[in-house]
Image (cartoon, helix red, strand yellow):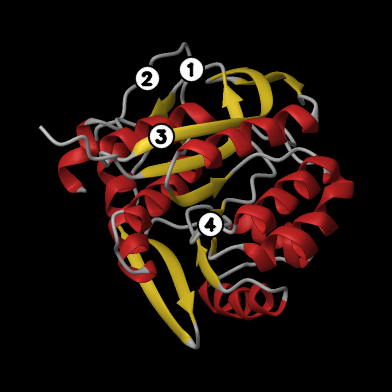
Amino acid sequence: MANIAPLSALTIAGSDSGGGAGIQADLKTFAAHRVHGLSAIAALTAQHTRGVTAVNVPDVGFLRAQIDACFDDFDIGAVKLGMLANAEVIEAVAEAIEHHRPAHVVLDPVMVSTSGARLLETSALDAMRGRLMPLATLITPNLPEAELLLDRPIADVAAMHEAIDGLRRLGARGVLLKGGHMPGSGDIVDLFAEGSRVTTIAHPRLQLEAHGTGCTLASAVAANLCLGRSLQSSCMVAADYVHAALRGGYRPGRSNIVVLDHLGAAAHV
């Protein structure tokens, strides 16, 4: 049997000790897409389904060593960026991206956890805007994250369209703006923008609270880019995958928070 190296995707993000989000969700998503998963841990969190109790940020020199080791030995089709806690970490990751020049970079600008814990230092916002966003093939903010990036509220779908224009002016090449935080009982509406075209991606709203959806969506986009899909197709397939993983989700902790069924949703890849 020929020894054919599998496609690889690299996640540079935070570790979730509860296994529902972050690096752990990313690696499960890569596996569900049959893409080899690599990881560089940019932060360590002590967390569970009820919240984040502590955060530790490793030395940036060691973070860079993890990234360089991955690029030294693997053919990396896409990089997914998640929790990057401060400006120093963001700068180190930006320098690594500029050095290694991966074909695709999917930036999930993680700022606040599902439980409301702040995961990005305020001083790092400018670094996120000025250093990382211009390097990204795609950014995948939810509404609270987009509001922080733009420093203005996003109250309805019309404001989402305006927000996409604002994010593009900040340097984002592609945008997948997630509308799950929009109040209402109708479909969840996400907007994908590449060039001047904006595409609506809608799914029925599920009556549950979930953990790890943003991480999973961004890593699913990265995995699909590794598999050769276009950016628009990758976003649409990834959104379907997350919806299926939510429908099959389960509650492993002592809260009502649902964790996604990554492998059960693999049939929707």
**Callout 4–callout 3 Cβ contact below 8 Å:** no
Q: Which mark is residue 102?
A: 4
Work out which residue is located at the far bottom of the displayed protein and give it: 196
Q: Which residue is mark 2?
A: 251
Q: CA distance from mark 1 to mark 2?
A: 7 Å
In this view, the residue in front, 221 or 110, is 221
Name the kind of residue labelled 3 in the image: Gly
Q: Which residue is mark 3?
A: 37
Q: CA distance from mark 4 to mark 3?
A: 15 Å
Callout 1: SS: loop
**Callout 1–callout 2 Cβ contact below 8 Å:** yes
Q: Earlier in the sequence, mark 4 or mark 3?
A: 3
What residue is rendered at 51% in x and 49% in y?
A: 79
- The mark lying in front, picked from 3 and 2, is 3
Callout 4: SS: loop
Name the kind of residue labelled 4 in the image: Pro
Q: Which residue is mark 1?
A: 255
Q: Earlier in the sequence, mark 3 or mark 2?
A: 3
Decide: few, some or many residues near mark 4? Use Cα within 10 Å; few <14, some 14-19, many ≥20. some
- The mark lying in front, picked from 1 and 3, is 3
Name the kind of residue labelled 2 in the image: Arg
Q: Earlier in the sequence, mark 1 or mark 3?
A: 3
* Residue 261, image x, y percentages: 29, 30
Q: Earlier in the sequence, mark 2 or mark 4?
A: 4
- The mark lying in front, picked from 4 and 3, is 4
Q: How many marks?
A: 4
Callout 2: SS: loop
Q: Earlier in the sequence, mark 1 or mark 4?
A: 4
Work out which residue is located at the far front of the displayed protein and give it: 2
- The mark lying in front, picked from 1 and 4, is 4
